[in-house]
Image (cartoon, rainbow, N blue to C red):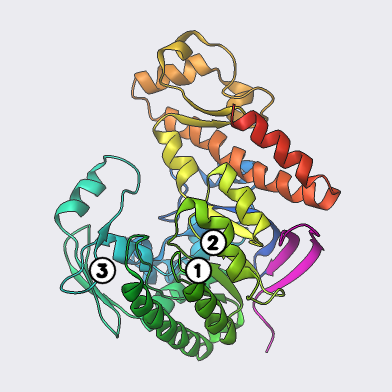
Amino acid sequence: MKNPITFEILKESTDSLARVGVIHTPHGDIQTPSFAVVGTKATVKALTSKQLNDINPEVLLANTYHLYLKPGSEILKMAGGLNKFANWSKPTMTDSGGFQVFSLGKAFGKNISKFTDEGGENEENKRMEKAPFATIGEDGVAFRSHIDGSDHFLTPEKSIEIQHNIGADIIIAFDEPTSPNDPIEYQKEALERTHRWAKRCVEYHKSKPNSEFQGLYGVVQGGKFPDLRKESAEYISSLDFDGFAIGGSYNKNDIGAVVNIVNNILPKDKPRHLLGIGEPLDLFDGVEAGCDTFDCVMPTRNARNGSILTKNGKINITNTKYREDFGPLEEDCECETCTTYTRAYIAHLFHSDELLSNTLTSIHNVHFLVNLVRNIRNSILEGSYDSFKKSFISEYSK
């Protein structure tokens, strides 16, 4: 049977695990390293598909949990899949839904509980604090919808079925993320459950015709513990996955070391995705540790709060000093926002509570990260990675 996705390595670094490659998918190629733009609910917040196409990211990642609850995965299946539903012609990914089920709720008894802040004070976060609960068991997770309080039960098989309906090129096995603060005893328990669920995901996926045109990634967990990470990488790589995702949790200072351990074990001929990493300096660590793709909600979330990514570091466009600044958000940036509008205008939009502020800043932040990783890729190909990294960090960290 033909593999639904394949990975081709074009160049490898001699100084680290960094590599340049191409992931071939049914909806086209993903040039790696690459930043996957997050379109949680089949939309990158505040952007149209045309605006996104103008930025030209390689891949879009949508959220299984949210699409399952609204509009429902059957609606996407009826529409012909995520690409047609969202008017997106390039490659797509979906996560498993596990992170949201666990992090947006509270478990009972001895099971893990944690809350997450998905982007500041908004009505959805306030509802989450009051309503949803998730209980983790061997068969799956029982949880309450943050939308209407309805009860649901998500199993590894159900997660894959939902992702089959959504129809992304790359889907991810159902796993149990943990908190960086969880003790090693619970990390071991969760890891063993993640491994059992991974096997169930592979078996269910391979039994369906979707396995011929959707690639399935297995998730490596294990927290900040090297032995658990090693164990997880060895087990997950023994299963018939088309690629791999590396999940949290770990402290930010541990990213390079932890991911290096994993990627020295995972097979070289399959792609590796680092989940939830999007801070510019972290992306360099991820690339050097051998990861091929990355995703994070940070660029659009920060944009809606007025936090702007620039080569000289982050700025807050709502600061008073920008009200009379008639330069672009970032000098020499070629995005639509920077070539058309001034800092003063965008500051005015924020101070006037105009929705256009979210669109213009999101265009820039997404453009910034997509092109940063694209430039990292080009620097590896050209043999100038070290000088590019040194120059970027010097400017960005001023």
Check whether the beta carbons of the residues at disc 3 and disc 1 lie within 8 A of each other: no
> Where is residue 354 drawn, in percent x and y?
37, 25
Q: Is residue 397 magenta?
A: no
> Where is residue 328 drawn, in percent x and y?
59, 20
Q: Left or right: where does residue 217 sit relative to residue 200?
A: right
Check whether the beta carbons of the residues at disc 3 and disc 2 lie within 8 A of each other: no
Residue shown at the point (37%, 64%) measured from the top left? 99
Q: Earlier in the sequence, mark 3 or mark 2?
A: 2
> Where is residue 247 drawn, in percent x and y?
47, 65
Foreground of the two, 75 or 165: 165
First to last magenta residue range: 1-24
Q: Left or right: where does residue 67 sit relative to residue 84?
A: left
Image-quadrant location for residue 10: bottom right
Q: Left or right: where does residue 285 sit relative to residue 154?
A: right
The residue carrying mark 2 is 83
In front: label 2 or label 1: 2
The residue carrying mark 1 is 80
Task: Look at the picture and state if 374 lies above or below 163.
Answer: above
Residues packed near mark 2 inside 10 Å, few (<14), some (14 to 19) or many (20 plus): many
Residues packed near mark 1 inside 10 Å, few (<14), some (14 to 19) or many (20 plus): some
Image-quadrant location for residue 367: top right
Callout 3: helix, strand or loop?
loop
Image-quadrant location for residue 88: bottom right
Q: Identity of the amino acid at label 3?
A: Ile
Callout 1: helix, strand or loop?
loop
Residue 153 disc label: none
